[in-house]
Amino acid sequence: MTTNEIMKDLEPLTFDGLRLERPIIISGPCSAETEEQVLETARGLAAIGVKVFRSGVWKPRTKPGGFEGIGMRGLLWLHQVKRETGMLVATEVATREHVVAALDAGIDILWIGARTSANPFAMQEIADALKGHNDATILVKNPVNPDLELWIGALQRIYNAGIRRLGAIHRGFSTYGKHLYRNEPQWHIPIELRRRLPMLPILCDPSHMGGKRELIAPISQQAMDMGFEGLIIESHCNPDCALSDKNQQITPESLNVILNTLVMRDIKQSTENLAILRQQIDQCDNDLLEVLSKRMRVSHDIGVYKKEHNMQVVQTQRYDDVLQSRIRQAQEMGISGEFMSTIMQAIHEESVRLQVEIINNSKDDTK
């Protein structure tokens, strides 16, 4: 049974009969620090129409000694936000104890962070704690490493616990060294998640993805252009004084500016006018397949020649020359060099696999 067959009965994100409509906006501070900070931020967000308030009360830190959250007291502050503003409230959970405490406190939405979703043992512990709470709403962030199967596995564990109000959060993937983004988007991974699980709502976390305030707006727009259901954005009444992740938090006023400048594409618009262009794409794909098939036939013949002349399969210098040449040609034609490199590496790997298979075949019956 495929993943989309397993999760075909997912429910919309609905609370007390009110369905959260696109774009779903979830916002609030990275960490609940004081009751005053939480309430001031919540009031500012409520004033601009935000419906869901988020705040971490347990904060997993990379190294010990940093601010690791206010703990259970923060749940009381979130309850106060809910009572005073009418907003739904959300927080992160990472253990069975977190789940029990958050549900007992009436938290509307629980999200599971990237470090936790990468750990199947932790995910199963959380799933076990959720059994019997079928009305809970759970959002699962992508694992820190770019592993789609691990992400789907985390979602399936929650689904198997009986949760049907389930969603995903794309927050990017960790990389080593300095990059533009704190966590690389690698948009092809959530695109494939959408293809595999078309009923699953996907939100984007531009705060953790970008790691900088100035990147929140462009990442948010890109997520909306790609049809994501919403955004989870960190905001703080005084972000420069935040105890955690201050560089990626914005004020409610700044959030209001970003939301008012977002361009929302009509994802339900008829695509009839695209039919001719899509036919051209289909023809191009057919042409590509024909060319690839021809190239593999040539690779086959090269493999036979190498076997007959007792030659090694991989000719490193030849491959490097071809790779660099094709990249230059691609760039001259307006095609990304990185994209062309990926394509050529895939073609080369398949050619090598084919030739190794020929050489290892004791009988050359391929002619």
Image (tube, rainbow, N blue to C red):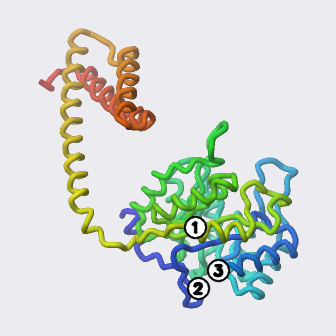
- Is residue 107 among the parts visible in the rendering? no
Mark 2: amino acid: Phe
Q: In which quadrant of the rendered view does residue 116 lie?
A: bottom right
> How many numbered marks have been drawn onto this rendered protein structure?
3
In the image, residue 5 above or below residue 307: below
Distance (Cα) linking label 2 and label 1: 27 Å
Q: Earlier in the sequence, mark 2 or mark 3?
A: 2
Mark 3: amino acid: Lys
- Is residue 144 among the parts visible in the rendering? yes
State the mark number for residue 353: none
| Residue name at image x 30 percent, y 24 percent | 356
Residue 117 horizontal/vertical position (percent): 61, 58
State the mark number for residue 261: 1
Q: Residues within 10 Å of mark 1 (few under 14, many from 20)?
A: few
Mark 1: amino acid: Thr
Q: Earlier in the sequence, mark 2 or mark 1?
A: 2
State the mark number for residue 15: 2
Q: Nearer the viewer, residue 249 or 152?
A: 249
Q: Which residue is mark 3?
A: 51
